[in-house]
Image: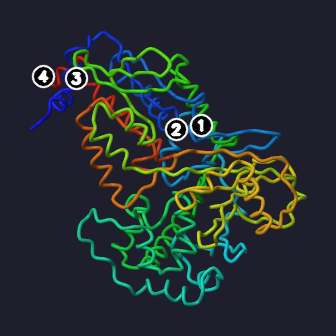
Amino acid sequence: MQTGLEKISGLHTRHLMNTLPQSSALRIAVVGGGISGLAAANRILEERARLNRTVELKLLEASSRLGGVVHTIERDGFVMEGGPDSFISEKPWALSLCRRLGLEPNLISTGESQRRSFIVRQGKLQSVPDGFYLVAPTRIWPMITTPIFSWPGKLRMSADLFLPRRKLQSANEDESLASFVRRRLGREALERMAQPMIGGIYTADPEELSLRATMPRFLEMEQEHRSLILAMWRQRQKMLQSQSSGPRYGLFISLDQGMSRLVQALRKKLPASSIHLSSQVSALRWSPSAGHWILDLRNGAPLQADAVCLALAAFQSANLLEGFDTQLATELRSIRYASTATVNLAYSLEDIPRVLEGFGFVVPAIEKREILACTFSHMKFPGRAPQNHALFRAFMGGSLQPRAFDYDEGEMIRIVRQNLRELLGIEKAPLFALVERHVQAMAQYRVGHLDLVADIEANLKKHSTLQLAGNGFTGIGIPDCIRRGEECAGRLLEALEATSPQGSRRLA
């Protein structure tokens, strides 16, 4: 039996049809000015013609700038990223958006000659074996000769070639990344490769990280090919055959003046009157009598909207929805987040005692160091440091090292310098250092995450003109956030399309 609230919500679209004058402007509010909210707002403007109505857009951001974790800082010729420094080309949504914004001439790839990275083992940097992809090898000889794994560890990894595939009890069956890697490749593969590589991407504990939500390709490989190593080898052969003409971009893509160029381009596409900074929404309410949403602002008069996209962390959306849909708010709060920090350090190249021939290194948790990884930014992308200078970017915090996030800036810088001294021999003090914190910014996709998202989506169907974007649902990377934001915008436009004269005739 439906509650009164559910009946009201279920009649949401029809109520809008009955109460909204067909000649009035449609008011759409996007709450959150990170990359998800910007992508949603941009798509609304791109597709607004389909409504055959004037659209009044409001983008509400609580802080004093747009971009969220995407933040580029320029200083003394250095281009430093406080958040993500790139996006991957395998997922097309960020690349497509850059092209639509006219940014294709500004796209840059990683340097061809130095496309390798390192893993810390017993206080030394060891090259990731050629052909090794996240958890498994595509080439046998580099795996045999690498010092990263012991001989027992290598033999255990090789057993994957003979192990049977796991029989799934259902199509939605999930397991942790740690369980999967141990089962297929053994403990060393998990501790020395999978945990720092994949766990570092998500700043998550692999014992809790959902395989289906983060790396479903590996699950598919096991089911289709039985052996993960065999599947990786076959995939590499196909890639080599398909790359005869050469790829347009490498795996990682950035912008020539930093990732904030994407934020700036999106801001230019939006009408200046639609952007409202330092505008924190304190509550969201639905008015059944008026047939619209009411957004209470902490510093300002309430706003009315016919449709709302909350492009926020899941717990922030939960706070706004608590008085409207308790069940939805509870589900959103069950998505956990971790805090991370980036530490940029600038150096003169003459102060670096060894030649750096790669993009950076990751640190396994078993090494007991208080940094997760370090990027050699000046090696990874051109133009990140002036000539004869170097730029390093270290990462701290995450679910496995929450205490490190609580250190003050001086302590963070000291720890990073200590690691650079021990691992790279850098004794000199940096020219300067810059710390940027991201509080509760990284969603943790725990086992069962996709089932939770499915429940959230089912509840959202009761509210046709409300959508939830952000990195808490279907991907944490920039392409995933763009895709989610654009999909949410499309759903809102579809719901509002029913309020147009053409939509009314279709529903009659």
Q: Earlier in the sequence, mark 4 or mark 3?
A: 3
Q: Residue at x 52, y 28 (%)?
A: 61
Q: Are marks 4 and 3 in contact (CB under 8 Å)?
A: no
Label 4 element class: loop
Q: Which residue is mark 2?
A: 35
Label 3 element class: helix
Percent across and percent down for residue 263 are 59, 34
Alpha carbon distance from label 1 to label 2: 9 Å
Q: Earlier in the sequence, mark 4 or mark 1?
A: 1
Neighbour tally class for label 2: few under 14, some 14-19, many 20 plus, Cα within 10 Å: many
Q: Which residue is mark 3?
A: 503
Q: Amino acid at mark 3?
A: Gly
Label 2 element class: helix
Q: Which of the 4 image quarters holds residue 396?
A: bottom right
Alpha carbon distance from label 4 to label 1: 43 Å
Quadrant showing the C terminus: top left
Of the residues tagged 2 and 4, which is closer to the observer?
A: 2
Q: Earlier in the sequence, mark 3 or mark 2?
A: 2
Neighbour tally class for label 1: few under 14, some 14-19, many 20 plus, Cα within 10 Å: many
Front-most of 88 and 201? 201
